[in-house]
């Protein structure tokens, strides 16, 4: 069984019809058994909307829920294990949401869809 996780930009790009995702990454997303997102992505989307850094066609909660449904994505909750592991990671990346996503991917041994090259510095397999 294959599985991957989308970071926040990966989810936004997917929901916007592919955005900056490569054709090969879109194919991988379509052919992967399970595509995950972290609950940290919901936090990040909500904050971006509140700060007017992201504009959506509907309220953030509705958009997020619809994106999960339409693309058959599985949300991974933030657990104490994930939180503590994210805090123990080297400070290459200082964004708490991204650190939670990295920790989730590392603990679950998932490839990650992101544009952020710093994820690779954590030994992550990154799809762009």
Image: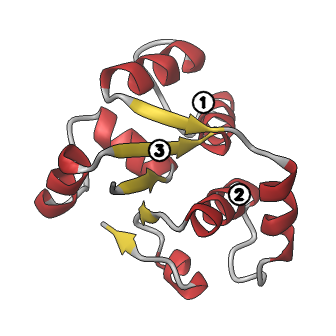
Q: Position of residue 19 (x, y in %)?
A: 24, 47
Q: Label 3, label 2: how many angstroms apart (C-alpha)? A: 13 Å
Label 2: element kind: helix
Label 1: element kind: helix
Q: Quadrant of residue 118?
A: bottom right
Comparing marks 3 and 1, which lies closer to the viewer?
Answer: 3
Q: Is residue 86 left or right of residue 50?
A: right
Foreground residue, 16 or 81? 81
> Which tag, 2 or 1, sits closer to the chain's start?
1
> Which tag, 3 or 2, sits closer to the chain's start?
3
**Which residue was labeled with disc 2?**
100
**Which residue was labeled with disc 3?**
36
Q: Is residue 32 above or below residue 70?
A: below
Q: Which residue is pictured at 48% across the width and 34% down the height? A: 74
Q: Position of residue 101 (x, y in %)?
A: 62, 57
Comparing marks 3 and 2, which lies closer to the viewer?
Answer: 3
Q: Are marks 3 and 2 in contact (CB under 8 Å)?
A: no
Q: Position of residue 4 (x, y in %)?
A: 40, 56
Q: Which residue is pictured at 32% across the width and 21% down the height? A: 70
Q: Label 3, label 1: how many angstroms apart (C-alpha)? A: 22 Å
Comparing marks 2 and 1, which lies closer to the viewer?
Answer: 2
**Which residue was labeled with disc 1?**
49
Mark 1: few, some, or many residues within 10 Å (few <14, many ≥20)? some
Q: Is residue 77 left or right of residue 24?
A: right
Foreground residue, 5 or 99? 5
Q: Label 2, label 1: how many angstroms apart (C-alpha)? A: 19 Å
Name the outermost residue toward the front: 1
């Amino acid at each position: 069984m294959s599985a991957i996780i989308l970071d926040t930009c990966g989810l936004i790009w997917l929901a916007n019809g592919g955005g900056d995702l490569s054709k090969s990454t879109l194919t991988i997303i379509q052919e992967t058994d399970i595509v995950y997102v972290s609950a940290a992505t919901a936090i990040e989307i909500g904050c971006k909307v509140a700060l007017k850094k992201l504009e959506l066609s509907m309220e953030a909660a509705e958009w997020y829920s619809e994106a999960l449904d339409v693309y058959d994505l599985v949300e991974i909750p933030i657990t104490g294990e994930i939180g503590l592991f994210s805090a123990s990671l080297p400070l290459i990346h200082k964004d708490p949401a991204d650190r939670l996503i990295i920790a989730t991917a590392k603990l679950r041994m998932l490839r990650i869809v992101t544009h952020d090259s710093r994820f690779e510095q954590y030994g992550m397999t990154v799809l762009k």
